[in-house]
Image (cartoon, rainbow, N blue to C red):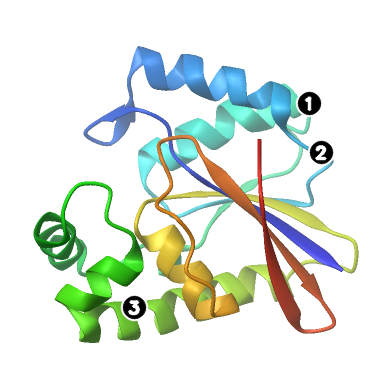
């Protein structure tokens, strides 16, 4: 089995965490499940900043933070428009009703990117990935075929791969 803790970054102002975002990341660090064989960011500074806080809390500063830019959408404005039209707190299924081509294509692409992270882990390995909403949710949909609730800032899920099958569990 292989495991990915997939989290949304905490509170931000632009591409940096706010003081509240830093404090929230520090609080989350007490609920982690190390050791990790990989720390993965989408490449956004706010995601990398959060991972630096979490990685430091685990004492695993020797494990590099890698970027998986394919976990970040190239059409973020289109996602924002779909979310705005679907309404506050809309999940990917609500956004699919607004823009089915966006959700179907992006879920597939993001799911492939998340699968690459999983497949890069050794058996029993665990990665901590920090990304964005709704693209985290779209990646899970593309990978596991399961629509999950919208992730609030700092929230996450556990992706468990077992013999090529995927299941999703909540994280505290």
Label 1 element class? loop
> How far is mark 1 from mark 3, CA to CA?
35 Å
Residue appearing at x 15%, y 65% in the figure: 82
Of residues 38 and 30, the one nearer the viewer is: 30
Check the image and report above or below for 74 versus 131: below
x then y, percent, for residue 150: 39, 52
Q: Is residue 118 in view from this perspective?
A: yes
Residue 106, numbered circle: 3
- Image side of residue 153 versus residue 114, left or right: left
1 and 3 marks in contact (CB < 8 Å): no
Q: Tell me where residue 138 sits by quadrant.
A: bottom left
Nearer-N-terminus badge (1/3): 1
Q: Find disc 1 in the rendering and name its residue.
A: 59
Label 3 element class? helix
Label 2 element class? loop
Q: Tell me where residue 61 sits by quadrant.
A: top right
Residue appearing at x 66%, y 25% in the figure: 29
- Image side of residue 163 versus residue 112, left or right: right
Q: Find disc 2 in the rendering and name its residue.
A: 34
């Amino acid at each position: 089995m292989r495991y990915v803790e997939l989290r949304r970054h905490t509170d931000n102002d632009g591409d940096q965490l706010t003081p509240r975002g830093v404090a929230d990341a520090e609080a989350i660090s007490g609920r982690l499940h190390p050791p990790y064989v990989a720390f993965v960011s989408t490449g956004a500074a706010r995601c990398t900043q959060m991972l630096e806080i979490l990685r430091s809390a685990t004492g695993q500063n020797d494990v590099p933070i890698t970027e998986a830019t394919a976990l970040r959408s190239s059409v973020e404005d289109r996602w924002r428009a779909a979310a705005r039209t679907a309404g506050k707190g809309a999940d990917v299924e609500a956004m699919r009703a607004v823009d089915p081509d966006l959700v179907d294509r992006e879920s597939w692409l993001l799911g492939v990117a998340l699968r690459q992270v999983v497949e890069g882990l050794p058996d029993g390995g665990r990665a901590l990935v920090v990304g964005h909403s709704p693209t985290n949710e779209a990646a899970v949909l593309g990978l596991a075929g399961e629509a999950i609730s919208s992730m609030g800032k700092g929230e996450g899920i556990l992706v468990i791969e077992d013999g090529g099958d995927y299941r999703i569990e909540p994280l505290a």
